[in-house]
Amino acid sequence: MAKAALMDFDEALKLYEPVLGFEVHVELNTETKMFSPAGNPAHASNHDAAPNTLVAPVDMGLPGSLPVVNETAVRFSISLGLALGCQIAPSSRFARKNYFYPDLGKNYQISQYDEPIAFEGQVQVELTDGTVFDVPIERAHMEEDAGKLTHVGGATGRIQGAEYSLVDYNRAGVPLVEIVTKPIFGAEDRAPELAAAYVRAIRDIVLSLGISEARMERGNLRCDANVSLRPRGQEKLGTRTETKNVNSMRSVERAVRHEIQRQAAILAAGGTITQETRHWHEDTGTTSPGRPKSDADDYRYFPEPDLLPVAPSRELIEGLRAELPEPPTARRRRLKAEWGFADIDFQGIVNAGLLTEVDATVAAGASPTAARKWWMSEISRLANAEGVEPSSLVEPASIAALQKLVDDGTLTDKLARQVLEGVIAGEGTPQEVVDARGLAVVSDDGALIAAIDEALVAQSDVLAKIRDGKVQAAGAVIGAVMKAMKGQADAARVRELVLERAAAL
Amino acid sequence: MTDLTRLSAADLASQLSTGEISSVEATRAHLERIADVDGDVHAFLHVSDHALDVAADIDRRRAAGEHLGELAGVPLAIKDVLVTTDMPSTSGSKILEGFLSPYDATVVARARAAGLVPLGKTNMDEFAMGSSTEHSAYGPTHNPWDLDRIPGGSGGGSAAAVAAFEAPIALGSDTGGSIRQPAHVTGTVGMKPTYGGVSRFGAIALASSLDQVGPVSRTVLDSALLHDVIGGHDPHDATSLTDAWPSFAAAAREGASGEVLKGLRVGVIKELPDSGFQAGVSASFRGALALLEAQGAEIVEISAPHFEYGVAAYYLILPAEASSNLAKFDSVRFGLRVDVPGGTVEDVMAATRDAGFGDEVKRRIILGTYALSAGYYDAYYGSAQKVRTLIQRDFDAAFAQVDVIATPSAPTTAFKLGEKIDDPLQMYLNDVTTIPVNLAGVPGISIPSGLAEEDGLPVGIQFIAPAREDARLYRVGAAAEALLVDSWGGPLLDRAPLLGGNR
Amino acid sequence: MSEITPELVRHLGVLARIQLDDDEVERLTGQLSVIVDNIAKVSEVATPDVPATSHPIPLENVFRPDVVGQMLTVEQVLQNAPDAADNRFRVTAILGEEQ
Ligand SMILES: [Mg+2]
Ligand SMILES: [Zn+2]
């Protein structure tokens, strides 16, 4: 495959206006699938399921099988629609999207077509500098996921050149909500950044609703990015491409940037853009063409005769609206005001995706400054070293409890870090770790004085210097005392006592 | 000793309950009858090899004093469109040869739970597409009245099985007449329940918005008894109605007294003139109406102006839904696989579907694909769904005037095997009177009305009631049946030729 | 008004994944033309004011509680598989070489 020519990004922006569009698929974390009572692999209890062990007849299209709609999936979808600022359709229905593919047990996907459950919304997307951008939502509809294909043989394990493929229907029928934006204008040179921020905004909303684990690396959240360019001053939209398989926020940003540069190079050279799906390649940071749109994309949609309309009552919709969590953007604004951080500090928390953790830690009693410090430094460092999410290491309540031990003098900062390691290692609550490891600060002056006297006697030269007024020489004695106390002393108190004893001895 | 195969299910049930006979005896008698005559009739695609074990178990349970359902121990034939765990389910197609379902259709599970004894799986037009059972991939079924003639379709196997006394009752499915039209040509009874009255879970789908499972029998009461067993809400089928249904058997028993006919308003459709039917068919129909009238029924002419669009709408909706329902037969998870050396999975799918489907199935899949494809949807599928609304309105208007509607069940008596097989359009017109019933979702029953003068072959009369009024059909059907059987001096099937080597 | 052509029938065969040979295409073209001519009349009465009926008995909001129910065992899932490996269904390569 020839490497695509790219135009310099700034140059491309001078000549063309990028127009974006996104289709984000969210896997819901219901107990069961969209249309069957089989366990849902996107639910925490089923992560380790072996192939084809989460399958009911309809998931593999067995003859005679029928779908029945999962009530919780409908409620989750309505909540998501409301959180996206959408209107909820008084009546919506399912349709069959017909196409043959081995991962599709029935060879049609049950989706929604002309009557989606939610439509006409708007999502506030915050860029890294805090600028808020409104992304218009066209619709959000319910559908089912397909099974999983594994390609075997050939060089790469990719579909190209594979000898055969294996099909696992566990994922077939996982409830999905597909969120489709309207064309997004005006992002200009921040289009790549907006792409990532949009996906992050959807992820925040979904997480705040608790309706999906929203782990992109697991495919809980998948983004298809549409990009087109139109020459400056032209009204008509350009031809778009749809880049699939973009499974991290950083990749979404890179893919949009790449498509802008690639399309600009083609257009500037007098070429035309082919309307097609493209595949994103994480390793090379490039896209390659998939199947061009063709007659074979005639999906022959028709109303799903096995299912009835979904007609949520006003009471249900208003009840779910009343239960909605605070919108992430409003929440950020509120927390920033409450905590009083500088822009850069606050945005750092947001960009690290640790707002929820810091908020929960503050709610559990820690000061905002302490909570921020824990999550942004020590916990992030440990998580980074282990290659996991900070939130997976420790509960916010534990951090608040730990900070309380620091605040009341039981622990020094250094001791507290050791206690944190114990907590993460599963040794218990901070207090339990303190007790088990005997890590508390020695607050008994008697013990300290004994150690200080011993050190002053041993280092009589230092004692002399202190008495001569060279107070800074005390450091050596303090160090020795701290060492003798295995670090479990308050260094400031030790210093005070050293000066006292030096005078008294 | 009486020939147990000549008994109705109700009579078998009462003799089983008093201990006069055992289920093993009843089952053995039917298995022997199958062995005797099915070589000629070919009603069965598969005969159970453990029916006697099931029967013995029922006998044991009865002896132990267990409380069993009314039909416990009675043999049952099952149309091959219904999936069963203990017998193959092919829907009459090569593409499903040998397929063993890991689950039972709800109606089959309910029949088993009620103690019915499955005898085997009956023949049918491939995927229930047809009106003659000639489109079975496993060869046609023959009409017990004349082995050179068709037994109707798609459920020719179930109708022939009960007509040939191979089973007292059977399960069928009816998408456009597949229970009622075979009943018409075999002198038997068949009921298409209200859409949603009987679960479709485990019925291999033809057209989901039209399909209904229903009973096939020789008497109205037997259909009602079986309907009581299989009907009612099933959470596995979203289209299943949650209604509390009355006892259909009680309705049939009540109807047999004939009281229901006094003052019953019977609608006859103006737009289905006698000229549209074989002379002997309309004569039989008129004769039956006269008998009803003599008992106090009032015959009212009604208008159903949109019925003439019914067949056209049906042959758009059915192929469209079927083209999607049959997409699952693709060689990946079950059924036939035709290997294509060096081919992709797409090639394998296309070759498998070419080899595994018969001509009629391919014809309808292509037609349905066309009706749904971009640019044609509104003119075809969308318009057909509107015709459906118009036909429902015709029914609503009619039922404001009458209690039931009566029609001949089909335009002609049984035609010769092979006579219409190359003329799909002619074949499609067989269902002209039954199709509107499916399009509107209302119930319809066909019972024998007599023999056509010109060929001596059976004719059926169809009664149609408003949605959810299935019990009304059993009441009226049983009343009409009693009257007609009385007028013949015995059941119509007594006049059918004898079959089998040892007769 | 029939616009059924052999090319259209061949295309429909691709959409429906049925490999039709030339004889079948020719036969189906003729049969479908006759059938379509006869069923096209539905549009005569299907005026814009008539709503479509996709389901004969109107119901809505038919749901299932989100509770795990009966699932198939792996053996049941694979019991009719034409080919399987590693507890999964096996199919030949999905795309031709050139893609
Ligand atoms: Mg999409
Ligand atoms: Zn989708």
Image (cartoon, coloured by chain):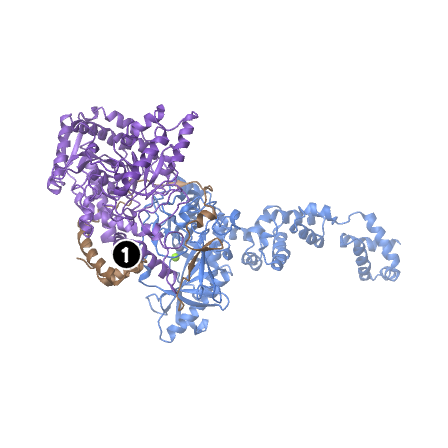
| Residue found farthest to the front | B502
Q: Colour of chain C?
A: brown
Q: Nearer the viewer, residue B61 or B130?
A: B61
SS type, badge 1:
loop
Q: Nearer the viewer, residue A271 or B373?
A: B373
Q: Residue at x 41, y 68 (%)?
A: C97
Residue type beneath disc 1: Ser
Left or right relative to A309: residue B379: left
Report the chain shown in blue: A
Q: Quadrant of ligand 1?
A: bottom left
Left or right relative to B385: residue A479: right
- Mark 1 C-beta closer than 8 Å to ligand 1: no
Q: Position of residue B208 (x, y in %)?
A: 31, 45
Q: Position of residue B93 (x, y in %)?
A: 31, 50
Q: Is residue B242 above or below residue B316?
A: above
How would you rate the neighbour count of disc 1 (Cα within 10 Å): few for under 14, some for 14-19, many for 20 or more? many
Kindly identify which chain the residue marked by label 1 belongs to: B
Q: Nearer the viewer, residue B172 or B209?
A: B172
Q: Could you say which quadrant of the image residue A11 lies in?
A: bottom left
Q: Position of residue A35 (x, y in %)?
A: 41, 46
Report the chain shown in purple: B
Q: Is residue B202 above or below residue A184?
A: above
Q: How many marks?
A: 1
Circle 1 residue: B373
Q: Is residue C69 visible?
A: yes
Q: Quadrant of the C terminus of chain A?
A: bottom right
| Residue found farthest to the bottom | A269
Q: Position of residue A215 (x, y in %)?
A: 51, 54
Q: Is residue A54 visible?
A: no
